[in-house]
């Protein structure tokens, strides 16, 4: 089995394992269904806007996950994880609607993995208060670490997609500023949005 095929299948299985190990608490779903649905729909929407590259694109969808984590109590982590994954599925289905079946499956799996695994990894390292109610010097460092880790995992998973699809690195360099903005801009908006919410 080729390495690129092992990569997307492995990411799909890892995403499934992460989701199954983080089943949402029914009481969280019962008390926050509206906001979880909004985070799902926003993730789906954001996945379809961003920097276009041959065969796909790169978006700031991870920012919705950042907002979800920072704006909800810690008990809502699993519910948020599933909401982000569901948004990845919805957005991915829209993004691949005109692709051939095999290419669509690979792209869909990678999109879901990218938003889900980056959200999960960031949530594991976040050591600040949840929900984030104010931005002070004491909680700024955990928020920044969280944003850097989430963005780094999101970028790493995108690089796996670049490898799988064989995109030209020159094309990646041409969009480097757009990528940097899409990676880093969601963090301040997520932090401020969480405080306002």
Image: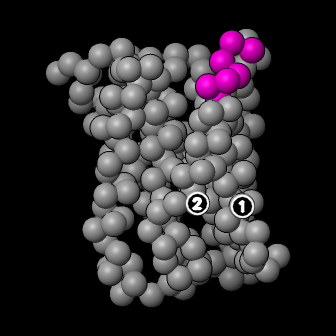
Count residues near mark 1 (Cα–Cα under 10 Å), then give few for <14, some for 14-19, many for 20+.
Answer: some
Residue at the spot 63% in from the left edge and 78% down from the top edge: 3
Can residue 154 be seen here?
yes
Is residue 36 rendered to the left or right of residue 150?
A: right
Count residues near mark 2 (Cα–Cα under 10 Å), then give few for <14, some for 14-19, many for 20+.
Answer: some
Secondary structure of the residue carrying tag 1 is helix
Q: Which residue is mark 1?
A: 94
Whether residue 32 is in magenta: the answer is: yes
Task: Please provide the residue range marked out in magenta.
Answer: 30-36
Please count the marks in the image.
2
Q: Which residue is mark 2?
A: 48
Residue at the spot 41% in from the left edge and 25% down from the top edge: 194
| Principal secondary structure, stretch drawn in magenta | helix
Q: Position of residue 16 (x, y in %)?
A: 73, 47
Can residue 25 be seen here?
no
Q: Position of residue 100 (x, y in %)?
A: 79, 80
| Labels 1 & 2 near each other (Cβ < 8 A) | yes
């Amino acid at each position: 089995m080729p390495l690129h095929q092992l990569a997307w299948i492995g990411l799909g299985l890892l995403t499934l394992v992460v989701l199954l190990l983080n089943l949402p608490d029914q009481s969280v779903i019962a008390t926050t269904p509206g906001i979880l649905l909004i985070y799902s729909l926003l993730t789906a929407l954001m996945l379809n806007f961003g920097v276009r590259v041959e065969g796909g694109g790169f978006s700031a969808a991870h920012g919705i996950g950042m907002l979800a984590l920072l704006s909800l109590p810690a008990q809502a982590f699993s519910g948020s994880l599933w909401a982000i994954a569901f948004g990845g599925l919805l957005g991915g289905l829209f993004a691949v609607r005109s692709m051939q079946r095999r290419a669509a499956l690979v792209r869909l799996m990678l999109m879901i993995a990218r938003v889900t695994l980056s959200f999960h990894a960031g949530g594991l390292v976040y050591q600040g208060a949840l929900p984030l109610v104010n931005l002070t010097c004491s909680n700024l460092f955990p928020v920044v670490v969280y944003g850097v880790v989430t963005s780094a995992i999101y970028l790493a998973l995108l690089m796996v997609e670049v490898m799988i699809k064989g995109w030209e690195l020159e094309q990646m360099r041409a969009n480097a500023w757009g990528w940097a903005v899409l990676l880093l801009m969601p963090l301040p908006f997520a932090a401020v949005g969480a405080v306002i919410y």
